[in-house]
Image (tube, rainbow, N blue to C red):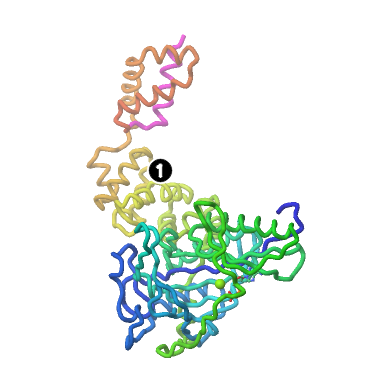
Amino acid sequence: MKDSPLEAVIGLEVHVQLDTGRKLFCADSTAFGAPPNTAVCPVCLGLPGALPVLDPGAVDLALRAALALDCTIHPISIFARKNYFYPDLPKGYQISQFERPLATRGAVELDGGRRVRIRRVHMEEDAGKSLHDRFASATAIDLNRTGTPLIEIVSEPDLRSPGEARSYLQLLKRLMEYLEVSDCNMEEGSLRVDANVSLRKKGSERLEASTEVKNLNSFSAVEKALGVEIGRQTRIRAEGRAVTRQTLLWDAAGGDVRVMRDKEDSQDYRYFPDPDLPPLVLSAARVASLRAGLGELPRAKRERFRRQYELPAYDADVLTSSRGLADYYEAIVACGRQPKTVSNWVMGPVLETVKRGIADLSSPGLAPGRLAELLVLVDKGTLSATAAKTVLAGMARSGDPPGAIVLREGLTQVREDQVLDRWVTEAVAAHPEAVTRYRAGETRLFGFLMGQVMRASGRKADPRRVRQLLRAALDADAD
Ligand code: ADP
Ligand code: MG
């Protein structure tokens, strides 16, 4: 679109699953991957006489999200029935907030500083799932998802490119993960996107007819689908035709959009307040206490990490991806360790240990004080970095302090010249050919010989000193 006088106008509707572990109006589990149709009860099925009861935990998470998105919270919101027929919706309606949503008029700021307004954040329940790929010719229905708590975050049409839509989604995902509102696992459907897009003359304020691509479940799908749809609309306009309001489906395999239905004949959902559910009334005190509990939001924290600890943007990003990780990092730095060193250790070996499931950040062996002790041993030269990684693994597994592991496993770094010299001499004697070639100018063989010395020492030699001694040995006998 670079040379085109048209610009893209994009607004996103994002569904985020609330991490309460249970359904919105009954206590059934929402655990992913349960055998089909095992987490259903009369309430999710809408059987006569079953009474939905709103989960206050879901409301708190929804409020946290809305507050972090800078929305106005409404003291009264209403759950309505959105009526439509679909095989995976046994009740015949979905409970959602319509005319009176939980929150409206928020905003977020993208990294480049662009502001994206949030139109509304409302709560709703999910429908079931139709499975088209399990049986050759039949569609199967899994109702476990029915009643799963969601929020829908609706943006104003403030985004101007597929890339910007992606940045916005990344920001939302990060925020929701950080606030522990949702795990945002897109493969499991915890974050789904409907993307609305239209084109207009650059500089125009008018909104043209838009199309909506439904149910995108990855960032790249959003970006690609928008790109393809912008291309399609551009061609339609170039031919002098008008874009019509349509709902589209993204065909990931074919890399194309397919028309699902025309919006002109879009259905009337006959919304009305759910007679089984009273209006949701929020006290000012509840909202205020949730607001106070938000604490420092990820963006502010990331900026502070960059400034206060002089960290590269990448480090600050990773370390502030969750509140737990950020607190963990700061606790180690507070023990007096150098911020960038701590960052390297946390982002590398510590997170690796956590990812491999050996321990987590709250395990005693990885306690911030313990990590700080380990880094002191490295700073003092007692441990080489390699040995320190071995000690860290031991700490994670056993929960013992680093000092005890160093003693037990004899990992103290050897720095006495006498001992180091012996290993150097051995290595030089054992590899005469490499030594000759090194002296003839093949300097890269230094690394090989260095490796031999370290190996001979069982990786306990102080590499800095070995380097000096080896170089001296090789150069001394050269002439
Ligand atoms: P509804 O679905 O209730 O009719 P809208 O279609 O106005 O509401 O808004 C749904 C989403 O579509 C919002 O995220 C909004 O920003 C976006 N949107 C609305 N109009 C346009 C437009 N002309 N171009 C692109 N996106 C739009
Ligand atoms: Mg819509």
Q: Is residue 417 left or right of residue 284?
A: left
Query: Which picture quadrant has residue 182?
Result: bottom left
Badge 1 amino acid: Asp
* Residue sticking out furthest to the top: 479
Quadrant in the rendering for residue 111: bottom right
Task: Name the secondary structure under disc 1.
Answer: helix
Secondary structure mostly seen in magenta is: helix
Q: Residue 472 appears at what percent x and percent y?
A: 43, 20
Closer-to-camera residue (107/77): 77
| Residue in the foreground of this view, choosing between 257 and 340 | 257
- Read off the magenta span: 461-479
Would residue 456 appear left or right of 253 to someone viewing this image?
Answer: left
Q: Is residue 378 above or below residue 46?
A: above
> Callout 1: few (<14), some (14-19), or many (20+) C-alpha neighbours within 10 Å?
some
The N terminus, quarter of image? bottom right
Residue at the farthest front position: 137
Q: Residue at x 35, y 25 (%)?
A: 453
Q: Which residue is mark 1?
A: 379
Residue 259 position in % (x across, y down): 57, 63
Name the side, left or right, on which 386 lies relative to 304: left
